[in-house]
Image: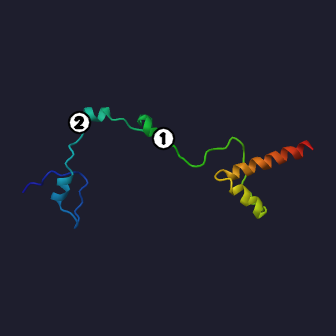
Amino acid sequence: MTRSKHAPGYVPNPNYTQEDWDEVSDNPPLTGEELSQMRLGPADLPQDLAALKSRGGRPKASVKRIPISLRVDLEVLEAFKATGPGWQTRMNEALAEAARKLRAA
């Protein structure tokens, strides 16, 4: 009895048979020409997929900012939050303006 040709990597398993493996593993081996045309690496990604290389996350700020814990009056916090998204940036701008006035005085 001759052994049937099957895809490499088949390991006997109670969940599937050799015939199951052979049936779904019907990709022919790559030819030398196909192998020579392969492009590997992120430099070969199409332009629209280049964004996938991005790590994402918070963008780097042009000015160094330091996270702190600050206690403010509830009415101050509510007033800034009521202005909608970006309230923290607006609060920072108000504090920066106050700091400029303190330095000038």
Secondary structure found at label 1: helix
Give the residue type at disc 2. Thr
> Would you identify the image quadrant in which residue 42 lies?
top left
**Residue 74 against residue 53 in the figure, above or below:** below
Determine whether the residue tagged by mark 2 lies in a helix, strand or loop. Answer: loop
Task: Tell me if label 1 and label 2 are in contact, CB under 8 Å.
Answer: no
Q: Nearer the viewer, residue 85 or 5?
A: 85
Q: CA distance from mark 1 to mark 2?
A: 31 Å
Q: Residue at x 36, y 35 (%)?
A: 39
Residue 7 in the image: state x and y as whole percent: 21, 51
The label number, if any, that marks residue 3 in the structure image? none
Q: Which residue is mark 2?
A: 31
42 lies left or right of 90:
left
Q: Quadrant of the C terminus?
A: top right
Q: Position of residue 83 (x, y in %)?
A: 68, 53
Q: Residue furthest right?
A: 105
Instruction: Name the quadrant containing residue 41.
Output: top left
Foreground disc of the pair 1, 2: 1
Instruction: Name the residue rendered at 26%, 54% in the picture.
Output: 9
Instruction: Name the kind of residue labelled 1 in the image.
Output: Ala
Q: Is residue 29 left or right of residue 49?
A: left
x then y, percent, for residue 30: 24, 39
User: Which of the two residues, 86 or 78, is positioned nearer the viewer here?
Assistant: 78
Q: How is the image coloured?
A: rainbow
Q: Is residue 58 left or right of residue 47?
A: right
Ranked by sequence position, the earlier of labels 1 and 2 is 2
Which residue: 27% across, 34% down? 34
Which residue lies under the disc numbered 1?
Answer: 51
Which residue occupies the extreme left position in the image? 1
Task: Using the image, determine if residue 93 lies above or below residue 42.
Answer: below
Left or right, 36 with reference to 55: left
